[in-house]
């Protein structure tokens, strides 16, 4: 799993910023590519947090 | 009186006669008690055993049957007040009260006395709510004072066991009615209060008449209950009955079953409650995760993320659009330029002598390049340049023929 250095909320909020930046389109092409890659990474981290939580919950299903 | 000694003892007759004289001097008195036996079989006289309301003591009473008749209807164990004179029977040396009047202590009077007692105790703060002690959630031992193998006892024990199988009881079966009730219940209460392991005491009995429940309003018993440190649950009679014991008890149960319910928790209910809470927590968490899941998915589905190519395609579209515009613009210029060229060429052609030359004319130029217009300015031997419709040649002037 990707090394989770930031919290779920941090990943989600930064992802929101990346998407907003990309959607305004003001970034240069090169910046946009970098932003997009960062977006993908953030999404992956957030996803891993949620999957982890879900697994923990399912394990304890009452 | 008279002296006696072992040498000169008094005879029985003398002694019993002396007692009789002494007793006869006692006047009639009002006595309260409970008729525990009533015997009207022989002759005109009726024989009654009058028992004390609290203590285990009694007196024999004798009266004319009419006195009994006057006090009818007398319920069993009727509580009465009698006007009687103590009499000593020398024949068998026994003391009996010869009653002139028997009056039943009416319910109304009892109620009045009860009310008075209640107000007195209330004024002494015995019923104050801050005196009430909370019942323990899980008692080590449950003290139970009840009638002998009564329904009340069964209800309490069975219900408590069903709710909390490992409940331990300390039961005292006592008489719960009539004269003995007060002393026996009090004794049992004392014992259970002294037992350290007993954390709560239930005092219960089934329904009954007003008189039946009266012992549970007895001042002595009620004050004793009030003084107990162990919490007391009172479950006396039916819902509507409310003996004074209810007011000093720490909890008043409407029925024996209700008492059991308040003394031990219901293991099944507790388990269910906990399971319910766990369930709610789990559901709450699941919904949080689902909501966050949706948000992340939403981000990922946004065009900029889902199809990054759009970053490039949108730009390339811009580029292509620009190119198109260049092309269009360029081709526009080109067309313009071409048209201009055509016009220029047409103009050049229009200005150029070619068309005239085609019609046979030629252009003569001097060596300086000027065009020869005036023959008179030519001299023989001048070199001329002749442009013909097709090609060029040179010529030299030979003779000049002026033409007017």
Image (spheres, rainbow, N blue to C red):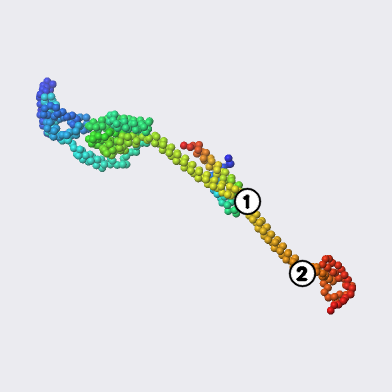
Residue on which the image places disc 2? B351
- Residue B256: x and y in percent read 31, 34
Toward the front, the furthest residue is: B359
Q: Residues within 10 Å of mark 2 (few under 14, many from 20)?
A: few
Going from N to C along the chain, the mark reached first, 2 or 1, is: 1
Vertical comparison of B312 with B278: above or below: below
Residue drawn at (13%, 25%) of the image: B93
Q: For residue B313, which numbered disc appears in the image?
A: 1
Can see residue B87?
no
Q: Quadrant of the N terminus of chain B?
A: top left
Count of numbered circles in the view: 2
Q: Chain of mark 1?
A: B
Q: Nearer the viewer, residue B114 or B373?
A: B373
Vertical comparison of A12 with B251: above or below: below
Can see residue B68?
yes
Q: Nearer the viewer, residue B186 or B171?
A: B171
- Residue B111: x and y in percent read 21, 39
The quarter holding residue B164 reads: top left
- Residue B119: x and y in percent read 24, 42
**Element carrying mark 1:** helix
Toward the top, the furthest residue is: B7
The answer to whether tags 2 and 1 share a subunit is yes
Q: For the residues marked 2 and 1, what is the alpha-carbon distance in whole angstroms?
A: 55 Å
């Amino acid at each position: 799993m990707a090394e989770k250095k930031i919290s779920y909320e941090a990943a989600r909020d930064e992802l929101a910023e990346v998407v907003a930046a990309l959607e305004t389109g003001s970034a240069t092409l090169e910046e946009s590519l970098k932003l997009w890659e960062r977006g993908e990474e953030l999404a992956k981290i957030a996803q891993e947090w949620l999957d982890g939580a879900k697994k923990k919950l399912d394990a304890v299903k009452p | 009186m008279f002296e006696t000694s072992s040498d000169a003892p008094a005879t029985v007759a003398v002694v019993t006669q002396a007692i009789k004289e002494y007793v006869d001097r006692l006047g009639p008195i009002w006595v309260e008690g409970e008729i525990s036996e009533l015997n009207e079989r022989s002759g005109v006289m009726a024989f009654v055993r009058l028992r004390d309301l609290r203590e285990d003591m009694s007196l024999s009473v004798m009266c004319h049957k009419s006195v009994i008749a006057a006090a009818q209807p007398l319920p069993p164990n009727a509580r009465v007040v009698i006007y009687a004179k103590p009499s000593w029977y020398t024949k068998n040396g026994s003391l009996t009260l010869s009653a002139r009047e028997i009056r039943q202590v009416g319910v109304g009077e009892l109620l009045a006395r009860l009310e008075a007692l209640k107000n007195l105790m209330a004024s002494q703060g015995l019923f104050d709510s801050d005196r009430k002690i909370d019942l323990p959630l899980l008692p080590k031992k449950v003290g139970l004072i009840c009638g002998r193998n009564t329904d009340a006892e069964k209800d309490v024990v069975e219900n408590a066991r069903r709710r909390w199988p490992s409940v331990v009881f300390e039961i005292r079966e006592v008489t719960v009615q009539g004269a003995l009730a007060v002393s026996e219940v009090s004794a049992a209460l004392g014992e259970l209060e002294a037992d350290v392991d007993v954390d709560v005491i239930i005092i219960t009995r089934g329904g009954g008449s007003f008189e039946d429940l009266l012992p549970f309003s007895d001042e002595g018993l009620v004050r004793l209950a009030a003084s107990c440190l162990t919490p007391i649950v009172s479950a006396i009679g039916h819902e509507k009955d409310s003996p004074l014991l209810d007011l000093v008890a720490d909890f008043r149960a409407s029925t024996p079953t209700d008492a059991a319910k308040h003394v031990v928790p219901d293991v099944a209910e507790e388990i269910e409650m906990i399971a319910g809470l766990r369930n709610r927590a789990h559901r709450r968490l699941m919904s949080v995760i689902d909501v966050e899941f949706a948000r992340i998915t939403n981000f990922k589905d946004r065009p900029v993320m889902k199809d990054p190519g759009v970053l490039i395609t949108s730009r390339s579209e811009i580029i292509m659009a620009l190119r198109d515009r260049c092309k269009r613009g360029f081709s526009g210029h080109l067309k313009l330029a071409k048209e201009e060229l055509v016009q220029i060429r047409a103009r050049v052609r229009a200005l150029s002598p070619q068309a005239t030359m085609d019609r046979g004319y030629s252009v003569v130029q001097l060596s300086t390049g000027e065009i020869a217009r005036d023959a008179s300015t030519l001299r023989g031997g001048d070199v001329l340049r002749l442009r013909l419709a097709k090609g060029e040649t040179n010529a030299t002037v030979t003779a000049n023929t002026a033409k007017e």
